[in-house]
Image (tube, grey):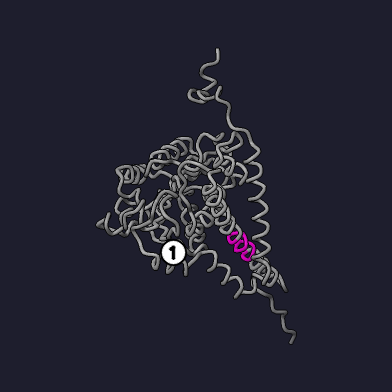
Amino acid sequence: MTRKKRTEPGGAGGGGRTADAAARKAADEERRGLLHEMLRIRRFEERCVELYSAAEIRGFMHLYIGEEAVAAGVMPALGPEDAVVTTYREHGHALARGIPAEAVMAEMFGRTTGCSRGRGGSMHLFDAATRFYGGNAIVAGGLPLAVGLALADRMRGADRVTACFLGDGAAAEGEFHECLNLAALWRLPVLFVCENNRYAMGTALAREHAETDLALRASSYGLVSWAVDGMDVLAVSAAARRAAESVRWGGGPHFLEMRTYRYRAHSMYDPDRYRGKAEIEEWKRHDPIDALAARMRADGELGGDDLTAMDREIAAEIDGAVRAAREAPLEPVADLTRFVYSEKAVRR
């Protein structure tokens, strides 16, 4: 009796093994990409701290250090046709969305080559090419914009998602309740991503909210909602993909509560007296960059010098962005009133 040759799942002969190898390679590349993006955001912001301390960057600045897993994990779940609305702690979102580091850094310096022509600075990054609609300085101010963008997409029949990033402090604002209610009532394609760093501007969550489970609160309006470990970029990535696809194909608005933590104060002006140093150090033990790097090393995906090489590559990119920002021109005083009104509207 002649035995039939055993075939692997996915095809005859070694087809299954080939598919498995391809899947492993794709997973490795995805992890490396996530690690690179988180490290890139971290190093960009650390450099901004140096430049701010040297008075090369002025105004307000809110750092994302510690929260990198959220931006890095969510953005790959979105397509180029999707929209992003975010808060004033948005440097990481902008970089992960694809706005060049040079354009972001130039905006920090207030130069005309910045993504907002130097008019917005740290808190008001904007880029039409990537459908990045802020950087909004008012707490919860981005939620109505996101609902409006999603309503427009629904009326046009577009298969788009609007990702709306908000902080836990936004849950205390009227816009939060109004916008979640309308999004659910009209089944709008919005993915609300709440970056719950537990302190809003400087008040502990439990001192501000009777119900601290923000995902549960969102579900009371009829949104599909769940909490995610915001310090685990792989968990963030998986949740964002699942939610974005459901929103895109008619599942209605979704709400992800990313439970994360910022290591730095609310802003560069904040003395950070509302929490203890021991608490911050405890959270650093769950650092998203360190955690993914350790997991990749354990799985043989990251060699001894790989992280150092990645760091050098990122440092070169940021050095170039700083040089370009320093050399870029400031906007002339003659253009002070430009863009107050649409230039197309005033032409005869």
Q: Which residues are magenta?
A: 27-35
Q: How many marks?
A: 1
Magenta-drawn stretch, dominant element (helix, strand or loop): helix
Q: Nearer the viewer, residue 23 or 202?
A: 202
Instruction: Say above or below: 117 vs 287.
Output: above
Instruction: Say above or below: 74 vs 123.
Output: below
Q: Where does the N terminus fall, quadrant-wise?
A: bottom right
Left or right, 143 with respect to 343, comes to: left
Q: Residue furthest front?
A: 54
Image coordinates for residue 141, horizontal then vertical, percent: 38, 40
Q: Residue furthest right?
A: 2
Q: Is residue 310 magenta?
A: no
Amino acid bearing label 1: Asp
Q: Which residue is mark 1?
A: 229
- Give the SS element for disc 1: strand
Q: Residue furthest bottom?
A: 1
Q: Quadrant of residue 208?
A: bottom left
Q: Quadrant of residue 8?
A: bottom right
Q: Residue at x 48, y 45 (%)?
A: 161
Image coordinates for residue 135, horizontal then vertical, percent: 47, 42
Q: Residue furthest top?
A: 348
Q: Nearer the viewer, residue 115 or 70?
A: 115
Q: Nearer the viewer, residue 90 or 12?
A: 90
Q: Residue at x 43, y 52 (%)?
A: 193
Q: Residue at x 46, y 55 (%)?
A: 243
Left or right, 277 with respect to 302, comes to: left
